[in-house]
Amino acid sequence: MDYIIETVNLTKEFRLFKRREGLWGAVLDLFQRDYRILRAVDNLNLQVKRGEIIGFIGANGAGKSTTIKMLTGVLVPSSGRLLVNGFTPYQERERYVRQIGVVFGQRSQLWWDLAVIESLRLLGQLYRVPDSLLEKRIADFADRLSLSSFLHTPVRKLSLGQRMRSELAAALIHRPPLIFLDEPTIGLDVVAKNEIRRFLQEVNREDGTTIFLTTHDLGDIEALCQRVVIIDQGRKIYDGNLDNLRQQFGRERQLRIELEQPVAPIVWQEICGHLPVRWQAQDEGRIWNGSFVEQEVTTAAILQPILNRLPVLDIKIEETPIEEIVADIYRQGGLAL
Ligand SMILES: Nc1ncnc2c1ncn2[C@@H]1O[C@H](COP(=O)(O)OP(=O)(O)OP(=O)(O)O)[C@@H](O)[C@H]1O
């Protein structure tokens, strides 16, 4: 299998200086320093196929940035191996960075005082994109990311949404096979988020670009990712698709059935009392709200006897929002893999 990212037991430890308390402690610190080791990434095994969009998520401090920094060659691992697009990132940084694109939501790769178009041209030259291709690419991005109205505006004057779109163009100007995106939609409104998500889908579909995405916005994950990896305290606790995540960790689902006429509880019990569903009547039995666990009973099995016997006006089924599932996993430490 051709993996674009492959890590084997990737580990990063930081040595943290332990301060002693009080004045005497400070004096002792001068002579003998005490350290503790913090393992930010702990034996991470990860394989990403070419063309995948992978969501890499975890609570604050889980080790996401440290992992991305190792994958992009900024940090040297303490142990383990990693190979990204055939490179060991920290060893061959200069050649390696030509193969990747990076957008860190909080930090800019654009020149603050230059117009967007000048920044893009400069980056194109740094990446040695031939001139004619570069102009074509800028025009293409200007069109697809709606950059035209501010191409000649200095970066410092852009709104956050405009800057993020420009950052994406900058990260992709050399058509890298792989991009790392860290919180690409942070602070943006719904329209701007959707625009960025649509663009990323296009880039992935048309150019086969692999996308490694870190975000706290699970809307990004739902819109983009076939696969999610969750880490907690540096360890991988989930690796799979969103549907499986829902199935494994999903809590109760809610069902709301609206009938044409009220139905007495005793009749309701007779029709569907045999099913593992907790029911609550509303509007004197005209509306029935049920809670059930997907692993125990299917929605079809619940609905069938009701639809056979009663005139139903409306049915609503609510899934547990992915945000809640992930919050639960963070709290419980998830499934150790
Ligand atoms: N340079 C460093 N020196 C010491 N400890 C560090 C360093 N960088 C990160 N850490 C620690 O490593 C752990 C993982 O941090 P990291 O920034 O990778 O988490 P994260 O998942 O990206 O969090 P967030 O979502 O808050 O950005 C944290 O406990 C953090 O305090």
Image: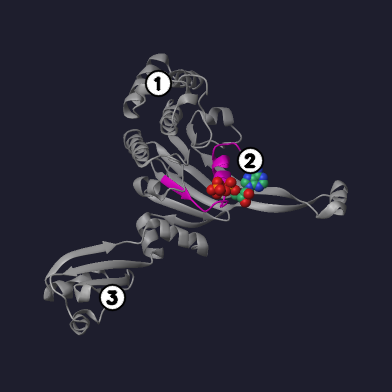
Residue position marked by numbered label 1 in the rendering = 151
Does 133 sit above or below residue 60?
A: above
Horizontal and vertical percent position of residue 302: 23, 72
Give the image quarter of residue 269: bottom left
Q: Is residue 337 visible?
A: no
| Distance between mark 2 and mark 1 Cα atoms | 37 Å
Name the residue rendered at 12%, 76% in the picture: 309
Q: Which mark is residue 280?
A: 3
Q: Is 35 placed left or right of 166 in the picture?
A: right
Horizontal and vertical percent position of residue 118: 46, 17
Residue position marked by numbered label 2 in the rendering = 76
Q: Is mark 1 within 8 Å of ligand 1?
A: no
Disc number lying in front (2 or 1): 1
Name the residue rendered at 36%, 58% in the picture: 321
| Distance between mark 3 and mark 2 Cα atoms | 57 Å
Quarter placement of the N terminus = top left
Does 99 sit above or below residue 71?
A: above
Q: Which mark is residue 19?
A: none
Earlier-in-chain disc, 3 versus 2: 2
Element on which disc 2 rests = loop
Amino acid type, mark 2: Val
**Callout 2 touching callout 1 (CB < 8 Å):** no
Horizontal and vertical percent position of residue 295: 34, 70
Q: How many other residues sit within 10 Å of disc 3, few (<14), some (14-19) or many (≥20)?
A: few
Earlier-in-chain disc, 2 versus 1: 2
Disc number lying in front (1 or 3): 3
Disc number lying in front (3 or 2): 3
Q: Residue furthest front?
A: 283
User: Which residues, given as a range, are shown in magenta?
Assistant: 54-74
